Structures are given as structure tokens and as C-alpha cells.
Amino acid sequence: MGRLCGAGVAVLLVVALAAALLAPGLGRAPFDDPGEGQHAEIAREMLGGSWLTLRLNGVRYFDKPPLLYWLTAISFSLFGLTEGAARLAPLLGALLAVGATAVLGVRLLGPTGGALAGLALLSCALFAAFARYVRPESLFVAAIAWGFTGLLVAFERRRRPDGNGCPPLGECGGHSWAPASIGCAALGGAALAKDPLGLIGPLVAIALAAGLAGRLRPVREWLPPLGLALLLVIGFGWYAVAAVTEPAFLWYTVVDNHLLNVARMRQFPDEDVPLSAIEFLTAAGFGAFPWILAAAVAVGALVRGRAWRDPAELPWVALALWAVGVLALFTVSPFKLPHYGLPAYPALALLAARAWRDAAPRPRGLIASHLVLFTLAGAGCAWAAAGDGRAFTEAVFGVSDVYSRKEAAWGQASPYPAWSSLQPLVTWAAAVLLAGAAVLAAAAARRSARVGAWAVAAVMLLLAPVVAIGLAVTSSARAVTVMAAEIRARLAPGDLLVLEGPIENAGAVEFYSGHRPVLLDAARSVLGIGSTFADAAGTFWSAPRFAEAWASARPPYLLTTREPGRSIVASLPPESARLLFAHNGRWLYGRAPAGAAAPAAR
């Protein structure tokens, strides 16, 4: 009983600490655009429309499944149309992911190891960022983490039935169907959150590990009928209904968004610019810094020990296969974005916790490697803080930020936060990292793996607020809120707003302004396939149609994210366009009165 209480307390404390670090100021910053705005708008439109067929700007949206939007719409109905309400679902996903990682860690490593694994995941910078960001990633990671937890606990129950001692969570008895069913239901949730690959991949990793250990059969003991039914209904039920009601949906989801995407032959591409292999590994590695180092040590030990032959190592082999498989798959894939490595992070956190446990007899090598990392990273941050920030900003945003890469492909600069708002964060990071290096030096002198591991955890947790504040200032630097207020003030109810470019570049414009734009040159976007439906014809304009409307008695207003020389305003009659307002990399134009000498900036 005492062991069970200790395990439960460890999990609860980790989840409580996660909530304390991630929740404050959740709604303080406006929606990041592009990034969050379109997802919040989809949920808002769901409140007055269909909960089955998703829509953005009134157009069919097939790019993501509905779990995030269902949860966000419920949150909006309970707490109002606010940024904080929109970010509750990602926060919930993060807390669930941390909880699942801690539970599995407790099962495999005991309360201390489980707590360290949960804190390792929590302190991964990329994970902490998406915990406060309106996207489905944290829900996706949570579903995969609980899938692994349920299915691997089922294997552990089979290995340790009654008579061999109570497992760490007090789950005596050989029955494995309950945790396995929970794991299957969670993997179904992964498909409903983002992608069916989140359902299939973990099953493949676990089945491969079980087959190598000679424990694949009987399959029904780790993939029971109830679990299989839950997996299929939750994972594919909505997809089946959507395929029946929207015939183009299945082709788009399976063929265009997956098969043709990998081959770089999509019929309906968006503007996202994929990373190179080196860029992806850099983003994934820094996003999981420094835990990925200890995880690599654990994977190396498993390989050297040929752990796949030992049934007791099955959970670790499955986790290693998943983590390495995810990173390797996207490294070689022609298309990948910075956050594609996130599903591997719970497994990396668990493997890192194991590496620190196994290093106890001879910890100096692991401690020394982290000491070097912290010293180099701290010195790098100190050097950056002393400069003008240009190199630091371009390096960080150029690799990790999808929008910056899209703007660079257009040959224009992305709006960045002011260096004055980022410099104190970089200074704080330098101080924390260098202080952590000093503590690690003491841990090396004492040969204490425990001190080393918790010093690393403490340093990374102290950096978590840097991630939150950095995300907030970035959102403020490119949010559409100020522009939306200008639109709301200028446009009368009958006035028409035209948005040039993909809707995702200003996805929250309707959310904040109350004006739904028509879209110009916007088919290369997440609404590409939606633009082919007859009921979207009035939403998507061509350049000739815009020119005709511009010359009419009541011309539209034009909102664009393209610099004047690259925008359609460059092709309009000279001096016919008047720049009304510019903010955060967006320009609002109106037609100049006849005879006025107020041309748009070129």
C-alpha cells in the first residue's frame, strides 16, 4: 500500500507542477497568426454550424480531424470566445501527456524515475511551447503516450501475475485487458486528434518488440476484443462518416495529404516549406534538449545488450523503436516540419530517466556530457545576449518557425519580436544554464547521478517560463488583433474585405474583426480542396475579378501579408490604392479618391 501511495503521489505532484508552470497567463497573448488563429476560428464556426464537416471562413476544411475543434468549441461555449478558452484543450493534452509518461515511468522505474520522466517531458522546450498553443499536437502526443502506457502495462501484467510481487502501481493480478483497452482507446484518440499514423505506428513498434522477445502471441491478451473495438470506432468512426458525407474527403486525406505529400506531388499543396534533414534533426534535438542526449545513451545500452531478446526489456525496446523510428522516418521523408518529432518526446523522456538510473554506479560520463552541453549553451546565450540579436533571431526562427520559412520563400522578412523583448529571456537562459553547469560540476565531484539528474531537471524547469514568455511576445509581434480592430473601425456592415494570400496567414481576422473576407490568390492553402466546391465559388477570387471590383462604385478593402511590390496593389492603376494601415507584417488598403495623390507604398 505504501508503494502504491508513493507512486500515486509522484504522478500527482508532477501533473500539478506541470499545471503550475503551463497554465499561468494562458490567455494573456493574442492568437499567433499564422499558427493558432485558423484553429480557433474553425472551432468558433463550429458553434453555429456542423460538428461533423469542419469549416474555415465558411469553406470546407479537411486538413485535420475534429478532436481539437470539438474540445475548443465546448470550451468556447463554457468560458466565452477568448484566447484562454481556446488554449485549454492544448493545455489538457499536455497535462495528460505528462501524466501518462509519469505513470509508465513509475511502472518501469519506480516513483523517483517516473517523476523524473514526467518532468523531462514537461521541460522539453518544444513540448512546453505546444502545451500553450492552439494546435492538435499536445493532444496527439497525449493520446500516443497513453496508448503506450496502457499497452505496455498490459505486457507487464502478463509478465508479473499474482505471486511474483505487486507491480509498482499496485496492479496485482494477471488481467491485462483493462489497461490494454485503455491504451487502444487512446490510440484511437490519436487518429481523431491529428493522424491515423499515430494509431498505427505505436502498434507496429510494440508488435515488433513483442515479436523479437517471443511474446507476440496470444495477441488478444495485449490487443483484446474490447480494445480493438474501441480503437476502430474511436480511431476511424469519424473518418468513415466524413468519407460518406464528403466524397472528396477520403481521397484528400489518404492520397493527397499523405501519399502525394511524401512524393512532393500534391494536387492541393499549402505554402509550408519543409525542413532539410539536418534542420529537422536540429529542431527535434533542441526541442528535446538535453534529454535527447541521455535517451541516446539508453538506446545505445539497449543495443549493446541485445535487449530485444529479453522479455523483461520489451517495454524499453518498444519505446526505443518508436523514438528512433519517428526521428528516422521524418529525417528521410521529403516533407517534415519542426514539430514532427514531438510524438517521440514521451519515449525520449522515459529513456532519459532510465539512462540516469543506470548511470548510478558510474555517473561521471553522463554528468560530464551534460556539463559540457550546459556550458556551451550558456556561453552561447550569453554571447547572443551581448549582441544586437539579429543572428540569434534569424537562426532560431529560421529553423523552428514555419511562418518565417514561408515568408523567406516569398523573398520577404517575417515579423519578429523586438530584440528588447527577447534579450532578457536569453540573458536569463544564460544565467540558468551556467548555474546548472556549476551544480553539475559538483555532482561530478560527488559522483552522484541523483544530484546530476535532478540538477538537469531543475535547470530545464527554470527555463520553462522563458518558453512561455517567448511564445507570448512572438504571438504579439505577428497577431492580427490590432489590424482587426482597425478593420472593425473602418468597415461598415456592407463593406467588403478581400484577403490576399492563404487564409492561414490571418486566420483570426474574422474572429477578432467580425468581418469574413473573400480570398484572393488563396487556393494554395489548407483550403485548397475546399475551394473546388461550388458553394465556395464566391469566396475565392481571381485577380481579374478583384480588379473589376476595385474599379466599381463601392470597391473592397484589401488586406495582405505581401509586401507592396509583391502584392496585387503593384498591378493596380497608379495612385488608385491608398495605404490605410500597416501592422505586424500586414497592409490594409483602400481605393484612393479620384484625383488624390496618396499612392500606396511601393
Image: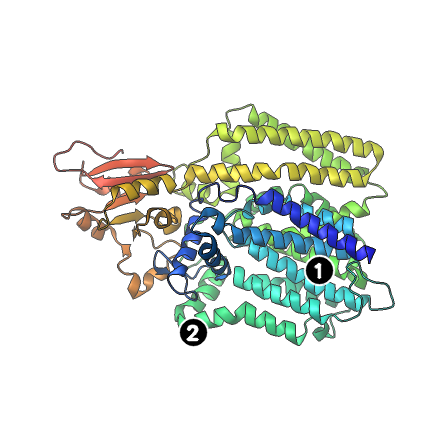
Q: Please report the residue visible at 71 percent of the width from the left and 60 percent of the height from the top.
A: 318
Please tell me in which quadrant of the rendered image residue 180 appears: bottom right
Q: Of residues 591 and 29, which is closer to you in this image?
A: 29
Color encoding of the figure: rainbow
Residue 23 lies, in percent from the top left, at 57, 45
Q: Please report the residue visible at 78 percent of the width from the left and 55 percent of the height from the top.
A: 5
Query: Is 377 on the left-hand or right-hand side of 166?
Result: left
* Amino acid bearing label 2: Val
Residue 341 lies, in percent from the top left, at 59, 51
Residue indicated by mark 2? 244
Using the image, determine if residue 12 lies above or below residue 314. Answer: above
Q: Of residues 320 and 463, which is closer to you in this image?
A: 463
Q: Of residues 404 and 496, which is closer to you in this image?
A: 496
- Look at discs 1 and 2 and give the one toward the viewer: 2
Q: Please report the residue visible at 84 percent of the width from the left and 36 percent of the height from the top.
A: 447
Residue 185 lies, in percent from the top left, at 61, 67
